[in-house]
Amino acid sequence: MNDMRTDAAINAGAREFSLAHANAVALYTITRREVRRMLRIWTQTLIPPAITMTLYFVIFGTLIGRRIGSMHGFTYMQYIVPGLVMMSIINNCYSNITSSFFGSKFGRYVEELLASPMPSWVVLTGYVAGAVLRGLLVGAIVLGIALLFTSLKLEHPLVAVTTVLLGATIFSLAGFINAMFAKKFDDIAIVPTFVLTPLTYLGGVFYSVNMLGEPWHAISLVNPILYMVNAFRFGVLGVGDVPIWIAYLVMCAFVAVLGGIALTLLHKGVGLRS
Amino acid sequence: MQTPAAARDLAALETIDLRKTYSNGVQALKGVSLRVMPGDFFALLGPNGAGKSTLIGILSSLVNPTAGDARVFGISIHDDRGGVMRQIGLVPQEINFNQFETPFEVCVNVAGFYGIPRGIAKQRAEKYLNELRIWDKAHQATRMMSGGMTRRLMIARAMMNEPRLLILDEPTAGVDIEIRRSMWHFITGINRAGTTVILTTHYLEEAEQLCRNIAIIDHGTIVENTSMRTLLGKLDVETFVLDIHGDCETLPDVPGVKLTCVDGHTLEAEMSKKQDLNSLFAVLSAHGITVTSMRNKTNRLEELFVRLVEGNSNKAAA
């Protein structure tokens, strides 16, 4: 009797929520699962970027930076901090979403998502939110380490925050598309190695593109990472190589295009449904 | 607004000329039309590669159909995929949960994907993991669980949205008889409580014992779709295995009975269901053969299944 009452109460409770609430619960569930995954394997997700970036700060900032002198009125160490923070955010967002989503395909538990009533946008937003949160956490750790070596004053906080969010979203979406097409683990390693790393290093993290002659300056302007690094540098230091409105335009365009592609692929079930 | 009569006629599952051709050209379904009524315990049987998993894949949104439609309680998979998924619980053939999560997390997360608030999801997870007798493993990593436990976890997970239609794709494969019986008990209880159940299995005695209606699929087409009673009624021949004392090297002629000596102690007798056993025993006794015990060679459904599938293969070959 008691069991029956409990069942009735459970069922009655379950019926009393709307579709919007159901989607919000589903979104929270995916994001929570992603964050828990990231924290469970913290030695793989949080420690490596902290160690790598500490080495960058020691070698490029402290040892080599002293000999370089000032850049746009800042020490070399101060100049490269925004780029290194952005670089770690981009890399971690990308690797988080590719390994997590491809892992769910490989382990077949992506079927739990596909066989559920969740709309595609909820699945995509949940994975992107998880990746962005990892990017933000790693970015905060790297920034904290940087502050052990130098001092920084946030010139345009709103620009810095929106740039980080847009940059993290762009590379989370790009990683999601990569994971959808990936058939084996090699497929999720190719893009970071052969595309992401060169673009990041050539995106003005360590230097101002204004120092480059033509045609390298013009070629650098095609690199989307340049806009993210310089927009974030503008937010933190108040200086950048590209006009801020162009940087926003480029970033918003990438979010829209990549978001549209990811959503279409997911809706069609490319790489997921037979 | 639906009339009571219309609601009564609304099938739990209706597939209409459902077709699936894979990109490699394989035609897995060649126009499958089925109707499963609410509250039914329905067996979907077929040999390996017959199209069962493709059909279940379409119903659970893992496979895109090439043509045709499937309706679950009147909702079309083309019109409202989410609405269909809300009605269905799926126990797939292959293990497909995150093996780094605990059974409790697996169940609560899946409930979350259905939009069920976390508080309710936790209550349900405890309820179903308890009912399936794996609550003591609820907070251990799933990768440490035995085959029988993972099967029961997949049933618990499928129950998290308390579906109106539960689809079980070989749920008892590789499970020992004790656990299999406890799973039957659970599923029968769920069905009695009103949930429509569709079962695919290679254990035909399981289907015969549990299911009221049956469809047999082969080469992507339905070769039989009727009630279990009607189907079993079609079987007009039975084979008995007789344990004997005496020599069966030379066997007597018994009209209407085909006798085969399997070994020195075992005899097989294939005979019409209409024929009585007394005349067989009398002839054997007169021939110096004593029958010490007897049993059916195969269960009845297995016999029918083999005949139907063989008949279909012969037709296809012709």
Image: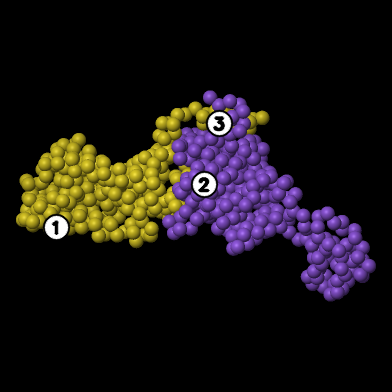
Q: Chain of mark 1?
A: A
Question: Which residue corresponds to mark 3?
Answer: A11
Question: Which residue corresponds to mark 2?
Answer: B18
Q: Amino acid at mark 3?
A: Asn
Q: Outermost residue, right direction?
A: B286
Q: CA distance from mark 2 to mark 3?
A: 33 Å
Give residue B138's position: percent from left, percent from top: 54, 46
- Residue A41 appears in the picture as rendered: no
Which label's residue is closer to the chain start, 3 or 1?
A: 3
Of A272 and B179, the residue lying toward us:
A272
Of B137 and A10, the residue lying toward us:
A10
Give residue A193's position: percent from left, percent from top: 26, 59
**Looking at the image, residue A191 lies above or below residue B64:** below
| Discs 2 and 3 lie in a common subunit | no
State the residue at coordinates (24%, 55%): A196
Q: CA distance from mark 3 to mark 1?
A: 65 Å
Specify the chain shown as purple: B
- Residue A221 appears in the picture as rendered: yes
Give left or right: position of A149 versus B129. left
Nearer to us of marks 2 and 3 is 2
Of B246 and A124, the residue lying toward us:
B246
Local packing at callout 2 (Cα closer than 10 Å; few below 14, some 14-19, many 20+) is many
Q: Amino acid at mark 1?
A: Leu
Q: Which mark is residue A63?
A: 1
Q: CA distance from mark 1 to mark 2?
A: 69 Å
Specify the chain shown as yellow: A
